[in-house]
Amino acid sequence: MNKGIWYAVAAYGIWGLFPLYWKLLNEVPALELIGHRIGWSFLLLIAVTVLTRQWTAFRAAAFKPRTLRLYAVSAALISLNWLTYIWAVNAGLVVESSLGYFINPLVSVMLGVVFLHERLRPWQWFSVGLAVLGVAAAAVGYGSFPWIALTLACSFGVYGLVKKKSPLPSLQGLTLETGIAFTPALLYLLYLDRTGKGAFLHTDALSTWLMVGAGLVTTIPLLLFSSAAQRVPLATMGILQYITPSMLFLLGIFLYHETFSTARAIGFCLVWAALLIFWIDTFLTHRAKRAQVSSPAVSD
C-alpha cells in the first residue's frame, strides 16, 4: 500500500482519538488548554523548522505584509476551531462535534461556489440541499441550533479557503499561524498564573505533562497529514478524511453514551446520504473524464 495512505490513516486516526486526550484534562478550562496547545505547538514547530533547515526560507517568506495578514486570519480561524472543539468534547458533545466534521466538506464546496466561482453539477446541488435538511433535523433532535457543529464546519471550511490563497508550504504556514497566536496565548497563560487561576504546575503532574504534550499531539498528525497530502490523490484524501468524524461519532455513542434521539439519527442519516451522493457523483464524473481522455480519437 502507498506509504502516503498509511500517513493519512495515522493522521485521521489520531484526530479521531483526540477526545480521549482532552477528556483527561476535563478540569482545565478550554481557553487555557488552547493557550497551551498554541504555545507548545509553536515551540515544537520552530524546532522542526530549524532541524529541517527551513528557517532561512521561512524567515525570508513569512514577514511580508500580505502574508502576515493572511496568516493572521487563518490563525484566528484555527484557534476558534480548536477552542470550540475542546470545549465541546469536555462538555459531552462529541457526537455534535462529529456532525461538524461530516458536513465540513460540503461547507467547503459551497465556499468554493461563492468565493471561487466553482460550479456544481445537479446531483451535487441535491446533496448540499440534503445536508441542509440533515442539519435542520439534527437541530430538532438537539432542541436548539447546532452551533457547535456549524462553528466547527464553517471555521475549518473558511480556514481551508484562506489556506488556498496562502503562499507558504504547510510546515512554514502552520509555524507562522501558531507564531501569530503565540503572544496573546502566552500573555493569557501568564495572566492566569499571576492571578492564581492557572492549572499549569498547580495541579497533578499528569495534567501538567498532558498540557505540555498538547503541542506534540497537535503537531504529529499535522506533519503526517502534510506528508500524506504530497503522496495521495486528493480524491483518496477526501474519502479517508471521514475516518475522523466516524471515530468521534462512535466514541460519543458507545464510550461516552451521549444521547442520540430519533431526530438526531434522521439528521445524521440525511448528512451521510448527502455525502454518499456527492462522492458517487464525483467518482463517476472523474471516471467518465478519464475514459474520454484515454480513448483514442476517431478518425474521419
Image (cartoon, rainbow, N blue to C red):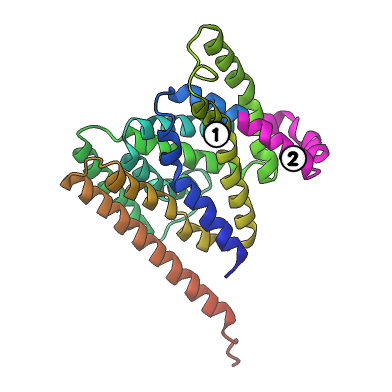
**Magenta-tinted stretch:** 40-68
Residue under the point 35% across and 61% down: 276
In the rendered view of the protein, which quadrant contains the C terminus? bottom right
- Residue 260: tell me if it is visible: yes
Residue 298 placed where, x, y %?
A: 58, 90
| Front disc: 2 or 1 | 1
Residue type at the position of mark 2: Thr
Which residue is under mark 1?
A: 214
On screen, 256 above or below 7?
A: above
Answer few, some or many: residues within 10 Å of disc 1's Cα (few below 14, many 20 plus, some between 14 and 19).
many
Residue 2 relative to residue 85: left or right: right
Residue 109 relative to residue 57: left or right: left
Q: Is 173 a magenta residue?
A: no
Q: Please tell me whether mark 1 sits on a helix, a strand or a loop.
A: helix
Residue under the point 43% across and 71% down: 284
Residue type at the position of mark 1: Ala
In the rendered structure, are the residues bearing label 2 and label 1 in contact, judged by CB atoms less than 8 Å apart? no
Residue under the point 46% across and 60% down: 239
Towards the viewer: 46 or 173: 46
Q: Quadrant of residue 67?
A: top right
Q: Residue 253, labelled with which disc?
A: none
Q: Residue 49, labelled with which disc?
A: 2
Question: Which residue ends up furthest to the bottom in the rendered image?
Answer: 300
Q: Please tell me whether mark 2 sits on a helix, a strand or a loop.
A: helix
Q: CA distance from mark 2 to mark 1?
A: 18 Å
Residue under the point 26% across and 53% down: 270
Residue 84 placed where, x, y %?
A: 42, 31
Residue 78 placed where, x, y %?
A: 53, 34
- Residue 167: tell me if it is visible: no
